[in-house]
Amino acid sequence: MTERPYVEVNDLRRVFDVSKPWLNRVLEGGERQFLKAVDGVTFDIKKGETFALVGESGSGKSTVARMVVGLLPPTTGEVIIDGVSMSSRAASGDRQRLRRRIQMIFQDPYASLNPRWQVDRIVAEPIRAFRLIEGERDIAARVAELLTFVGLHPADGKKYPHEFSGGQRQRIAIARALASNAEFIVCDEPTSALDVSVQAQILNLMRDLQDRLGLTYLFISHNLAVVRHMASRIGVMYLGRIVEISDGRELFSHPKHPYTRMLLDAVPDVGMTGRQRIPVSGEIPNPINPPSGCTFNPRCPLANQRCVAEIPALFGGVACHAVHEGRANAHAA
Amino acid sequence: MSVTQPVLSVRDLRVEFVTRRGVLKAIDGISFDIGKGEVLGVVGESGAGKSVTGSAVIGLIDPPGRIAGGEILLSGMRIDNLPPEEMRKIRGKRIGMIFQDPLTSLNPLYRVSEQLVETIRTHTNLAAGAARKRAIDLLAEVGIPAPDRRIDSYPHEFSGGMRQRVVIALALCAEPELIIADEPTTALDVSVQAQIISLLKRLGREHGTAIMLVTHDMGVIAETADRVAVMYAGRIAEIGPVRDVVKNPLHPYAKGLMGAIPSLENDTDRLVQIPGSMPRLSAIPPGCPFNPRCPFVFDRCRIERPEPVQHSQHRVACHLYDQSPVRSEAVA
């Protein structure tokens, strides 16, 4: 019997109502319109593991992240963390205790820190909110410890966010996430706003913290190279669905889904290895009115009648009729 | 006039911003050439001065910024001291521009056709009908499907990638000798970025247009550029053929920059980490601006500014590669 995964995400769906206002619909005769941002996403994360979701804009990866931390209620489906369901059916006491152990790091460190608060107060907020430590002196000591932990100086606590660079602000955001003794951190594009040399500092810091504290990460990014560096398992998303889910190494050495292959071919070759690549074509279609069947079929070199008619199920780590039927191998060779 | 005359030649360019807290040197003595059909990548992190370099070349430095010294030559003609009216005639006609955000470089209230025809007619003497035909040809060339129908759409009716193609078509209107592309793919998804990169490469090749590609993304440079200039704190740290600089960077900053990029091929437990961050313009350290972050720093770096020296194919501004004797003021 295997150990129960730390995070279980079961058939998560989220539909947004993007209809025009009621009056316009009545006058102009428009229909209600819905956008399926996330359409049946299932995955799990083991304790101490980094699981990454990668995809282009509009693939629904950030919506998944928001539902996992509970910032956005799912339309259907369930998120279970450490055996406790995050949906309203579970006992509220259990959920309350769980909340403290889940934190999020956002993309833009300029928007995620209150510009009117000193860093001390920002980092101490989770401690005060959850009443983890009583007494101002002890709180101050804990904040100083956290700041040192992420590579800042305890004296930096008296400054305001605008006095820091982007990378230092992201360190503050990490210190705040750790303040409530979080075990599970959802990182939504944590380094996309940073320069590469600063990105390297933050990625190294995140891995060090994981080693020292046994953190579990859900890592959201559009950057395949960053994802490869950070994650042990990776899910590739396209228009609200996971099209391929696999071990990190395997995904990059033997991509199966045609979209994964295309995405890998699109990444600029920094090493200038001169690897053979197929030119990319097409763009992500409008998610309000996605193609029938497999949503990738208009761009897919392997698409046939079945792909237009039938949505492929995620089976063996891939959601692709061509792979399931064995048609993809000839293409890969 | 020699055959090898570069399309763009920048000589010891300096750009300053006069502020209440003193004069900030955004660009401090940079020199480079771009030849016909060549793509020069200008790479660096935020604040390195790469975009200011682009703006200086097209004469779009707004006050309090000013060109404080040096020369900019376009096919041998000096353009940095032209009166604004003269510069306006060159901009768009002889130098095309592509900016990061295609939504802000297109006017949302005008159809794409109007914007293209207006630009074509400003810079050429084509009649309205011929200009429209040329606009359709340009849209076809940059890969917009059904250009004869799409040309009458408004910018918001295009996707981000298609919009950037329209911007590129707009830059090509007058067959410029030089295109300045400032982060042309940064706002785009990776699969769209790959398409725009190959488009830029093809255009440079087919039209012989010189391209100055400003970006923070080393991957884009490696894919597109022939030569690359690595900028740091308003100076060029290293310039050379792209393959050499990517595979064998010499300057400690260029080395760190390459090592900091996570790779798709190799496994590394830790990325190379350059401690600290780019200095603010108001606090550029004396000597070599990189010296506080440099692992190989020695006394000379803190006092004497390194001048670019030729080292095999590269030109690198670092005392490690400088064989010349220590200057007297540095010893003192």
Image (tube, coloured by chain):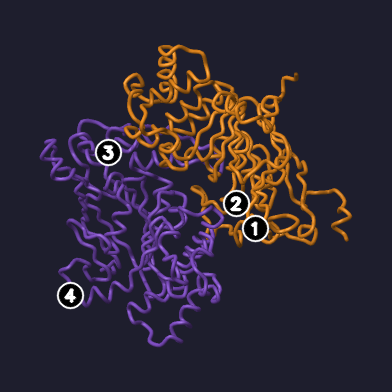
Q: Where is residue A83 shown, x and y percent of the image?
A: 24, 71
How far is disc 3 from disc 2 in space, using C-alphas?
A: 37 Å
**What amino acid is at disc 4?**
Ala
- In the rendering, at what x and y percent does residue B115 appear? 42, 25
In the image: residue B9, left or right of residue B98:
right
Label 4, on which residue? A91
The reply, left or right, for residue A298 in relation to residue A114 is left
Q: Nearer the viewer, residue B14 or A288?
A: B14
Crowding near the residue tagged with mark 1, few <14, some 14–19, many ≥20 C-alpha atoms within 10 Å: few
Q: Which residue is mark 1?
A: B21
Instruction: Choose mark 3 or mark 4, whichever is in front.
Output: 3
Q: What is the number of the mark on residue A62?
A: none
Q: Report the side of B302 relative to B293 (left or right).
A: right
**Secondary structure of the residue carrying numbered label 2:** helix
A306 vs A170, nearest the viewer? A170
Upstream in sequence: badge 3 or badge 4: 4
Point 50% across, 78% down: residue = A144
At which x and y percent is residue A210?
44, 68
The residue at which mark 2 appears reads as B257
Tag nearer the camera, 1 or 4: 1
Q: Secondary structure at mark 1?
A: loop
Chain B as rendered: colour:
orange
Gap between marks 1 and 3, in whole Å?
Answer: 50 Å
> Under tag 4, what secondary structure?
loop
Asked if disc 3 and disc 4 are in contact, CB closer than 8 Å, the reply is: no
Q: Which of the labelled discs sits on residue A286, or is there none?
A: 3
Residues at marks 1 and 4, CA–CA distance in whole angstroms: 59 Å
Say whether mark 4 and mark 1 are on the same chain: no
- Considering depth in this image, is B91 or A219 the residue closer to the camera? B91
Considering only vertical position in the picture, is B75 above or below A60?
Answer: above
Label 1 resides on the chain identified as: B
